Image (cartoon, rainbow, N blue to C red):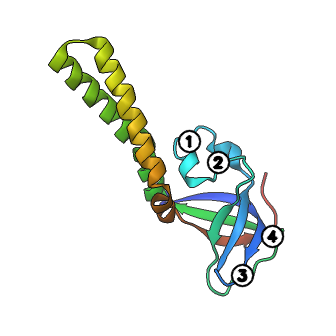
Amino acid sequence: MSDQILHHGVVEKLMPGRNMVGVRIADSDECAACAAAKICRAGNNSSELLAVTVPPGMRLNIGDKVEVAGSEQLHRKAIRLLMLYPTMAIIAVMVGVYLLWGNQLMAALAGVGVMFMFFIILYVCRNRINREFVFVIKRKLEAIDK
């Protein structure tokens, strides 16, 4: 099992002095089914570029094809944040409310409320969470194999 998730991309923006570049992921169609695609931004087909750290000594130019690596551990964390924790919270609250008051409508509304609150908390903490999800240039490619 690999400890990294690899993507091919093209350098579209240089960020001088920050040791980073803006990369558009070329194989984003592989990310379509991934629950973590919204957090890691690799699967996004939007105009947003993925900010990627460049290793010391590597020189890149706009248009260079690169291989970008992300940690499998962070991928699993993103899935937990987006799928597992909200699901567990919704189920726990719905069961708890139903057992306390015996009302299905109240339990369903409480579940929706908890889901809404959970995603508000994620939204408020997005900058802190984004700092944890870092991609690095693994190597420069001659051509994208597709």
Residue 12 position, x and y percent, is 79, 66
Amino acid type, mark 1: Cys
Q: Which residue is mark 1?
A: 34
Q: Are marks 2 and 4 in contact (CB under 8 Å)?
A: no
Q: Which residue is mark 4?
A: 64
Q: Are marks 2 and 1 in contact (CB under 8 Å)?
A: yes
Mark 2 is surrounded, within 10 Å at the Cα level, by few (under 14), some (14 to 19) or many (20 or more) other residues, namely many
Which mark is first along the chain, 3 or 4? 3
On the rendered structure, is 53 left or right of 93? right
Per the image, label 3 sits on a secondary structure element best described as loop
Q: Which residue is mark 2?
A: 43
The image shows residue 46, relative to residue 98, as above or below, that is below
> Quick one: 67 or 11, which is closer to the camera?
11
Residue for point 44% across, 41% down: 119
Per the image, label 2 sits on a secondary structure element best described as loop
Amino acid type, mark 4: Asp
Of badges 4 and 3, the one in the foreground is: 3
Which mark is first along the chain, 1 or 3? 3
On the rendered structure, is 104 left or right of 4? left
